[in-house]
Structures are given as structure tokens and as C-alpha cells.
Image (cartoon, rainbow, N blue to C red):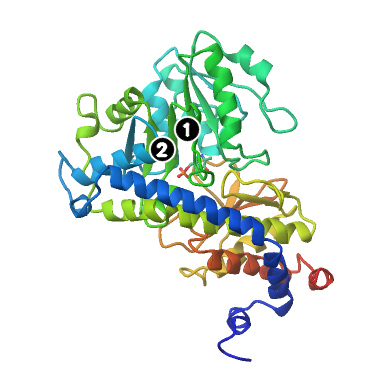
């Protein structure tokens, strides 16, 4: 075989001819979709550059700051960049925010007081928030501080039950939390426009209620963010989309000045707020990751749509479908058996640049109520903007696939997941031949 051919490299990496052909056929059908993703990335790239220029980002922003971090110019400028890019009054962007759950817990606990009620108008929130809120009793939950919680179930079609939301809003409701991405559920992820409609509905009835959006996995997927359509706070993780794969840790909250100030006073201390919190040398990766994020998200979207189309052809239920518009970078594939989920994840792992030789196993993870298998051979531990897949080992045995710092890697990972399912006897090679 010609060693300069791409086919040669795929065969060296263990991809069979049939699977490669299925990939090539699928990719050829997706040209238009991919072009649309490229155009969105171009728009968002310009948005980020403009935000950096407006705030006069300069080399001094990348310097190491230690100790209290008073006047940490890199940190303060970066927060202004996030606020500019997301069109908010302020932002808190810190390595001291340890993950997405922490950012969300911070935004909630900083802005709710005893006697207040939190409302989720779009059904159950992300698994780890159950303990934050106290839906599952937990040490330090909002429930322990006398903050009550109400949830409005989604309609059967996965969308908002407006009459029930109207009823659930009451004089105690202080904050409404809306999750953009589906998380570990098989409901749709919501578009920015749909989130905007929900926020308008709530604001018409209760203009004083704080509307917060869990923006995890949604950043830069569309041209607008929830903060452009009325969200008072948007919250996310830097080891997902906005970190661009380079941020080694961190979370952000962007929104109204008073709400962000509350968050800062809770993160550090009353009286100290945003003034302390040294950036400890991570600033260059935060800026550069934010700069790369629109392009990285574009590659991840191509991977998600590619996976949807391949697995749809093989007869597996996929959410979103291969043709649907995208509102986040997650692709759910319902494999229907523990063996399917495990083989898929082992395939993703074996495609990784890091830890490709290890075999992931289902395990009890903190914050989750069933065993979860996670595949990630990441440069940053647990980073899910890098190619990764995870699945709770419970019916309907769906796997949630996301990320890929480059489209070429996402593509390879998906082919490897299918190869692993074939090798494990979960998918029949004859089935693949019949699709060519
Ligand atoms: C990932 C995620 C979280 C939690 O973020 P971690 O960084 O894993 O703590 C919360 N909500 C949604 C929708 C997420 O995807």
C-alpha cells in the first residue's frame, strides 16, 4: 500500500476497509452542513477577536501573578473580554472555579438566600446539580440553607409546558435555571431562540426573577449566546467549549454586574469580591483557548454530525438526528445494551493521543447515581472538549459523545468506536457492507 495514502494510515491504526468506506461515504453527504459550521465559526472567531481588541489585550496579560492577586491585569482584562464577547455587563472567569458544577453551584448559592425558591422550568437538571440543589440530600446543599426547589416537567415532545411554568412561578421564586444542553437525558438540547422565548415568557410575568442558563457545551455553537436573548447569567466550564482545549482548569459566569459581584463575594469573601484570586500563570492558555474555541467547537460539531449519520445508518436511535440543527456539541447514541456502551467507549479511548492503551471500565463516579463509563485520552484530565464519550450504565444504554480538538481526530475516534463495536461482535460487518 502507498504509505503516503490516508488509507494506509487508517489501516495502520486498525480501521478496516469497510468502516473507512462508510466514513468516506458519510462525509461526502455532509458537505453543506460542514460549510454552515465553518461559517458560524468564522463569525464567532471575529466576535472573539473584536472582544480582545476592544479590551486591548497585550503581552502583559499573560504574566504570572501570585499571592493575593491584587491588580492582576491578565485576570481583570480576561473577564472584560468574556463580558464583551458574551455582551454582558460583567464576568467572573477564574482558575479557582474548579469545574462546571462548581460554577453553577456558585452562581446559585451566591444569588439565593434562605426562603427563596429555585425553579427549573425545563425538567430535571444535570445529574451533579441534584446534590447541589438537594434533590438528592447532600452535605452543604441549597436545601440545607432553606432554599426550596420546584421543577416543571417537560412535555412529551421534550419542550416547555408554559401553563405549568406559569403556575409554578410564585412570590418565593427568585431564580430560574435553564439548561441548554441535554446532559445525560434524551430530551432535545435547546436553541438560543427557544431559550429566549422561555425567558421572555418568565420575564413578562415576573420581571424581577433572575434567569440563569447552564451554558455548558453550548458556547460558540450558534452566533448568539443565551445572554443575547435575555439571560441574566450564563455559566460554563473552561474544560469544555470556551477553554478551546487549552485551559487546564476553570469556569466562568457572565451576566449582570450585581449578580457577578454576588458570585465574586461568594467565591472569595464578602468585602474582597473580584479583587483577589491570583491567576497563577494560566492566563495565556485561557486567552489562547478562548481565541481557538470557535474553531475547536466547529470540529466537534462536525464530529457530532458525522457520528449521528453513521450510527443512524446502522439503525441506532440518535439524538439529535443526522439532519437536525445543532444547539450543543453532544451526540447521544442509544446503543441499547451495556456491551454496546462499553465497546463504543473503548473504541474512543483507543483513538486517543494520550492513554490510548488503557481500557476504560464502568465505575461509580461522585455526583452520579449509577455506574458511568468514561473514555477520554485527554491532555487535560476529564476535559470533554477533547474527544470523549461517557455513558451511565443504565437503560436505555445511551452513550454521550462529544469533543475533538480537531475534526480529523473526531473522525478517527468515531471510526474507531465502530471498529470496536464490530470487534466486540455488537455490530455485524455484513451490516456495514450492506450500506456501501
Ligand atoms: C458538564 C456539565 C455540567 C457540569 O460540569 P462539570 O465540569 O462536569 O462539573 C453541568 N451541566 C451541564 C449541562 C454539563 O454538560
As drawn, 4 above or below 20: below
Query: Is 95 placed left or right of 15 in the picture?
Result: left
Residue nearest the observer in this picture, 226 or 397: 226
Q: Residue at x 56, y 62 (%)?
A: 360
Q: Is mark 2 within 8 Å of ligand 1?
A: no
Residue nearest the observer in this picture, 26 or 48: 48
Label ID, residue 132:
none
Image location of residue 238, percent across then percent down: 40, 47
Query: Is 107 placed left or right of 364 in the picture?
Result: left
As drawn, 132 above or below 308: above
Element type where label 2 sits in the image: loop
- Which residue is identified by label 1? 228
Image location of residue 405, percent across then percent down: 48, 61
Image location of residue 290, percent across then percent down: 38, 51
Element type where label 1 sits in the image: helix
Number of residues whose C-alpha sits closer than 10 Å to that of mark 1, classed few (under 14), some (14–19) or many (20 or more): some
Res 282 seen here: no
Residue nearest the observer in this picture, 263 or 44: 44
Mark 1 or mark 2: name the one nearer the start of the chain. 2
Q: Are marks 1 and 2 in contact (CB under 8 Å)?
A: yes
Q: Residue at x 53, y 50 (%)?
A: 40
Image location of residue 115, percent across then percent down: 44, 12
Query: Is 250 placed left or right of 337 in the picture?
Result: left
Q: Residue at x 67, y 61 (%)?
A: 30
Quadrant of the rendering where the C terminus is positioned: bottom right
Residue nearest the observer in this picture, 164 or 137: 164
- Which residue is identified by label 2? 86
Quadrant of the rendering where the N terminus is positioned: bottom right
Residue found at the very far top of the displayed protein: 171
Q: Residue at x 63, y 12 (%)?
A: 167
Q: CA distance from mark 1 to mark 2?
A: 7 Å
Amino acid at each position: 500500500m502507498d504509505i503516503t495514502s490516508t488509507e494506509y494510515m487508517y489501516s495502520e491504526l486498525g480501521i478496516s476497509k469497510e468502516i473507512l468506506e462508510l466514513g468516506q461515504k458519510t462525509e461526502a453527504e455532509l458537505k453543506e452542513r460542514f460549510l454552515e459550521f465553518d461559517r458560524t465559526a468564522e463569525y464567532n472567531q471575529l466576535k472573539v477577536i473584536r472582544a480582545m481588541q476592544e479590551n486591548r489585550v497585550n503581552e502583559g496579560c499573560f504574566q504570572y501573578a501570585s499571592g493575593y492577586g491584587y491588580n492582576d491585569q491578565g485576570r481583570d482584562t480576561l473577564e472584560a473580554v468574556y463580558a464583551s464577547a458574551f455582551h454582558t455587563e460583567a464576568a467572573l472567569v477564574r482558575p479557582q472555579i474548579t469545574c462546571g458544577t462548581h460554577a453553577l453551584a456558585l452562581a446559585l448559592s451566591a444569588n439565593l438566600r434562605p426562603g427563596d425558591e429555585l425553579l427549573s422550568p425545563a425538567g430535571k437538571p444535570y445529574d451533579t446539580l441534584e446534590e447541589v440543589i438537594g434533590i438528592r440530600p447532600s452535605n452543604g446543599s441549597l436545601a440545607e440553607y432553606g432554599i426550596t426547589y420546584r421543577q416543571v416537567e417537560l412535555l412529551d415532545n421534550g419542550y416547555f409546558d408554559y401553563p405549568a411554568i406559569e403556575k409554578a412561578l410564585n412570590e418565593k421564586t427568585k431564580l430560574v435555571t435553564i439548561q441548554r444542553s441535554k446532559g445525560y437525558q434524551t430530551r432535545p438540547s435547546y436553541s438560543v431562540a427557544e431559550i429566549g422565548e422561555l425567558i421572555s415568557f418568565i420575564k413578562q410575568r415576573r420581571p424581577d426573577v433572575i434567569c440563569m442558563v447552564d451554558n455548558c457545551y453550548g458556547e460558540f455553537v450558534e452566533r448568539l449566546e443565551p445572554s443575547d436573548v435575555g439571560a441574566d447569567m450564563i455559566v460554563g466550564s473552561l474544560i469544555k467549549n470556551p477553554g478551546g482545549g487549552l485551559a487546564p482548569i476553570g469556569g466562568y459566569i457572565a451576566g449582570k454586574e450585581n449578580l457577578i459581584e454576588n458570585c465574586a463575594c461568594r467565591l472569595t469573601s464578602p468585602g474582597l469580591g473580584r479583587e483577589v484570586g491570583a491567576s497563577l500563570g494560566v492566563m495565556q492558555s485561557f486567552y489562547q483557548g478562548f481565541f481557538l474555541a470557535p474553531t475547536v467547537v466547529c470540529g466537534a460539531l462536525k464530529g457530532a454530525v458525522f457520528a449521528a449519520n453513521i450510527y443512524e445508518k446502522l439503525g441506532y436511535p440518535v439524538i439529535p438526528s443526522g439532519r437536525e440543527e445543532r444547539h450543543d456539541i453532544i451526540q447521544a447514541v442509544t446503543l441499547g445494551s451495556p456491551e454496546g456502551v462499553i465497546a463504543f467507549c473503548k473504541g474512543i479511548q483507543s483513538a486517543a493521543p494520550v492513554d490510548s492503551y488503557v481500557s476504560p471500565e464502568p465505575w461509580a463516579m461522585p455526583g452520579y447515581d449509577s455506574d458511568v463509563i468514561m473514555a477520554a485520552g485527554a491532555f487535560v484530565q476529564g476535559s470533554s472538549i477533547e474527544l470523549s464519550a461517557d455513558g451511565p450504565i443504565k437503560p436505555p444504554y445511551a452513550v454521550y459523545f462529544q469533543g475533538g480538538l480537531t475534526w480529523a481526530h473526531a473522525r478517527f475516534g468515531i471510526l474507531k468506536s465502530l471498529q470496536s463495536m464490530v470487534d466486540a461482535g455488537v455490530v455485524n460487518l455484513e451490516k456495514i457492507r450492506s450500506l456501501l
